[in-house]
Amino acid sequence: MTIRDRIVVGVDGTEAARHALRWAVAEGLRTGVPVEAVTAWTWDGVPPTGAGPGVERELARLLCRHEVAQVDAAGTAMSVVAGDPVTVLLAAARRARLLVLGSHGHGRLRRALLGSTSGRCVRRAGCPVVVVPPPRHTIDSGRSVTRRY
């Protein structure tokens, strides 16, 4: 039996993922469930600098730490795992009550042709998945309004 004792949120350095992290942290505070930020990284060969996979992993770790700090998510666990983002997130979701992902808001055609990380996770995850939409910016009496969590 798998213990589903956390909220897992995908973190990739984008504003969409940062927004999802904010939502996950708020949900964790509301429910008392710990949050784990998960960053996937891949090694694509030798970059021009000659740096190896250890440097790539360290950069991914620093990215994850930076994103957690940006949303003031003290106490959030962090995992940096080598592999395809969908595979990494689905593995983390096996022990999660909830998987939270950001939506980049790409159009239907691009999604249909390329698929999306969130779409593939929604179809294959063994736990509920929340796809947090991008914040909406609207004009109301000359003011910009942003939805925050």
Image (cartoon, rainbow, N blue to C red):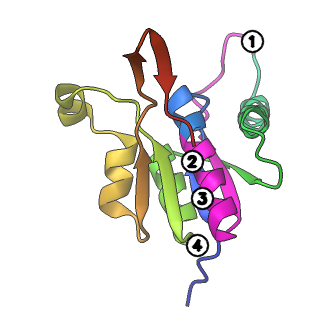
Q: Position of residue 31 (x, y in %)?
A: 63, 69
**Mark 4 crowdedness (10 Å alpha carbons): few <14, some 14-19, many ≥20:** some
Q: Which residue is mark 3?
A: 27
Disc 3 residue type (three-letter) = Glu
For image coordinates 32% across by 47% down, the residue present is: 119
Q: Position of residue 49 (x, y in %)?
A: 74, 12
Disc 4 residue type (three-letter) = Arg
**Mark 3 crowdedness (10 Å alpha carbons): few <14, some 14-19, many ≥20:** some
Disc 2 residue type (three-letter) = Trp
Q: Earlier in the sequence, mark 4 or mark 3?
A: 3
Between the C-alphas of marks 4 and 2, the distance is 19 Å
Q: Nearer the viewer, residue 88 or 129?
A: 129
33 in magenta: yes
Q: Nearer the viewer, residue 93 or 98?
A: 98
Q: Against 126, is 108 above or below? A: above
Residue 52 lies left or right of residue 41; in this view the side is right
Q: Earlier in the sequence, mark 4 or mark 2?
A: 2
**Mark 2 crowdedness (10 Å alpha carbons): few <14, some 14-19, many ≥20:** many
Q: Which residue is mark 2?
A: 23
Between the C-alphas of marks 2 and 3, the distance is 6 Å
Q: Nearer the viewer, mark 2 or mark 1?
A: 2
For the magenta stretch, what is the residue range? 20-49
For image coordinates 50% across by 53% down, the residue present is: 100
Q: Which residue is mark 1?
A: 49
Marks 2 & 3, CB-CB < 8 Å contact? yes
